[in-house]
């Protein structure tokens, strides 16, 4: 009798729970945002779609629905593509939308209190030093020389690949090139990852692994439990963070020894950070310097390499763009066809900040790449207080609010009916590049947090792209699947395998 009553109770409870879930889902049948489950919110849907996160979020936007709400157990997340909202978040009401303590906590193991993961006085101090150095002509000239040498190393490797007729992973080569560049420009260190033997770089692998796991944290309410138990991805994270810390500590130690030897003519960014208010209470500690290094790497290595990779993908799909860049390179630098006997070095020497700035079509082609494939596909802030966005969305204190460059670049109300079409000409008027509002084209952020290294990034990307497209043609290896990997940035999950041939 007692057993029958227990069974009956279980059946009634199951029926009640089922009815609860049914009614909960039924109420959302006309909703425009990701569906939720009782207690779990949209955690299940997020997990199932995480591999295609950017396209999943994009699927909820409409011309008349420009802000999407995603609910997970720990918080509410808002994603917006409305330029008025973006301007409100990044400029008009900047003080109400910091990175926030929660975001800082989630990414602290990776970015610490560096410029991309801090607010207030800490952020201002990092930005003050970085802003001054990026406006320094010595650093620009030093960067141009480093970019030229690294681009030439890449060209020589591609030349060998063209002769051997072997496919190569171009994204891996771009990542190696930009890692070498940021280590030289940022820290005064010659890493040599783009040397002909292409050595294994444990730091680079650890960096990408940590980047990916930190991204998962933002959408997984249960990661603190995994960390406390030292299981799953959190166990991997702990190991890989150790690799990063060892790398950065060695760089700081090496640079400090050189500076103690009165070699104070160094213009790399780390040396300038180490010299800031030297012997004063607010000089940067070793931990702060380590944070600065990792923030510089994600800015200087990942973003440029990722953009160059997607750029080559775009010109493989649209080969006429490569031909247009080739013709522009010839015109700007006074060159003939690439078979006329110019050496790699002869062409590279003609490329400077001033000459590359006149390559409007190449600038447009790279910017069009960033519109469709932004290196940073979304960027989030946390509401410090209650607010109402310009489109009427009510935001509570503690809600996370993100603008989404990946989706913004695909919205017809911003770019027209051909928003999904790769078309560099949309950026040109009478052959001259026409910039858009940074609140519409938000790949480099906007307002007070606008990217300090934008000009430096374009310099390296244009120098590399012009050299490559002047000497080579690229074709994606048949059957190679190109798709993104979900991280804080947006690299290709399977690399970019291409066949290379000389023009």
Image (spheres, rainbow, N blue to C red):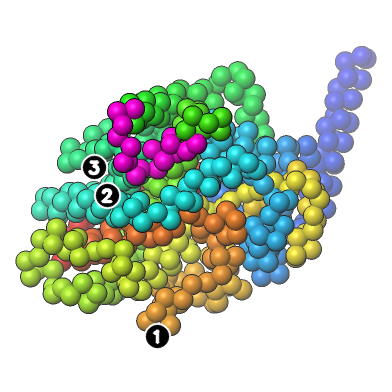
**Residue 410 placement: quadrant:** bottom right
Who's the residue at 25% across and 53% down the image?
A: 145
Name the foreground residue: 425 vs 216. 425
- State which quarter of the image contains the C terminus: bottom left
From mark 3 to mark 2, how far is it between C-alphas? 13 Å
262 within the magenta span: yes
Callout 1 crowding tier (Cα within 10 Å): few <14, some 14–19, many ≥20: few
Rendered location of residue 167, percent (x, y): 21, 50
Whether 221 is drawn above or below 87: the answer is above
Rendered location of residue 254, percent (x, y): 33, 27
Callout 3 crowding tier (Cα within 10 Å): few <14, some 14–19, many ≥20: many
Whether 173 is drawn above or below 140: the answer is above
Q: Nearer the viewer, mark 3 or mark 2?
A: 2
**Disc 2 secondary structure class:** helix
**Residue 366 placement: quadrant:** bottom left
Q: Which residue is mark 2?
A: 146
Who's the residue at 48% across and 72% down the image?
A: 435
From mark 1 to mark 3, how far is it between C-alphas? 39 Å
186 within the magenta span: no
Q: Earlier in the sequence, mark 3 or mark 2?
A: 2
Who's the residue at 69% across and 46% down the image?
A: 382
Q: Which residues are magenta?
A: 260-277
Q: Which residue is mark 3?
A: 194
Who's the residue at 37% across and 25% down the image?
A: 253
**Disc 3 secondary structure class:** loop
Q: Which residue is mark 1?
A: 430
Name the foreground residue: 37 vs 164. 164
From mark 2 to mark 1, how far is it between C-alphas? 33 Å
Name the foreground residue: 474 vs 141. 141
Q: Earlier in the sequence, mark 1 or mark 3?
A: 3
């Amino acid at each position: 009798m007692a057993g029958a009553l227990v069974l009956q109770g279980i059946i009634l409870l199951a029926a009640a729970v089922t009815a609860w879930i049914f009614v909960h889902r039924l109420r959302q049948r006309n909703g425009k945002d990701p569906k939720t489950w009782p207690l779990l919110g949209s955690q299940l849907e997020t997990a199932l779609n995480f591999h295609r996160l950017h396209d999943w979020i994009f699927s909820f936007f409409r011309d008349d629905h420009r802000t999407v709400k995603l609910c997970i157990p720990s918080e509410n997340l808002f994603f917006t593509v409305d330029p008025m909202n973006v301007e409100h978040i990044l400029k008009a009401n900047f003080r109400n939308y910091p990175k926030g303590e929660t975001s800082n906590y989630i990414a602290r193991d990776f970015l610490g209190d560096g410029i991309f993961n801090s607010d207030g006085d800490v952020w201002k101090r990092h930005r003050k030093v970085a802003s001054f150095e990026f406006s320094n002509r010595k650093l620009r000239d030093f960067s141009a020389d480093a970019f030229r040498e690294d681009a030439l190393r890449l060209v020589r490797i591609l030349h060998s690949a063209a002769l051997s007729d072997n496919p190569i992973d171009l994204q891996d080569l771009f990542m190696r090139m930009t890692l070498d560049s940021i280590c030289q420009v940022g820290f005064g260190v010659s890493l040599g990852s783009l040397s002909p033997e292409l050595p294994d770089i444990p730091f680079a692998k650890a960096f990408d692994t940590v980047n990916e796991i930190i991204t998962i944290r933002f959408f997984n309410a249960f990661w603190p439990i995994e960390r406390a138990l030292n299981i799953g991805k959190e166990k991997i994270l702990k190991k890989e963070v150790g690799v990063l810390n060892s790398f950065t500590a060695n760089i700081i130690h090496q640079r400090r020894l050189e500076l103690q030897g009165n070699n104070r003519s160094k213009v790399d960014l780390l040396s300038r950070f180490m010299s800031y208010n030297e012997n004063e209470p607010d000089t940067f500690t070793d931990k702060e310097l380590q944070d600065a290094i990792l923030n510089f790497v994600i800015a200087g290595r990942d973003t440029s390499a990722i953009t160059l990779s997607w750029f080559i993908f775009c010109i493989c799909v649209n080969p006429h763009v490569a031909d247009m860049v080739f013709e522009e390179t010839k015109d700007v630098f006074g060159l003939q066809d690439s078979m006329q006997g110019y050496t790699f070095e002869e062409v590279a020497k003609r490329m400077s900040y001033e000459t590359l700035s006149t390559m409007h079509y190449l600038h447009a082609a790279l910017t069009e790449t960033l519109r469709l494939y932004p290196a940073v596909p979304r960027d989030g802030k946390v509401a410090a207080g209650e607010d109402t966005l310009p489109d009427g969305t009510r935001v509570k204190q503690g809600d996370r609010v993100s603008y989404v460059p990946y989706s913004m670049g695909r919205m017809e109300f911003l770019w027209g009916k051909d928003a999904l079409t790769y078309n560099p000409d949309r950026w040109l008027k009478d052959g001259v590049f026409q910039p858009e509002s940074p609140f519409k084209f938000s790949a480099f952020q906007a307002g007070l947090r606008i990217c300090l290294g934008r000009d430096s990034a374009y310099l390296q990307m244009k120098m590399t792209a012009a050299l490559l497209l002047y000497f080579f043609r690229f074709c994606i290896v048949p059957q190679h699947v190109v798709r993104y990997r979900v991280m804080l940035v947006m690299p290709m999950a399977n690399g970019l395998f291409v066949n290379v041939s000389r023009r």
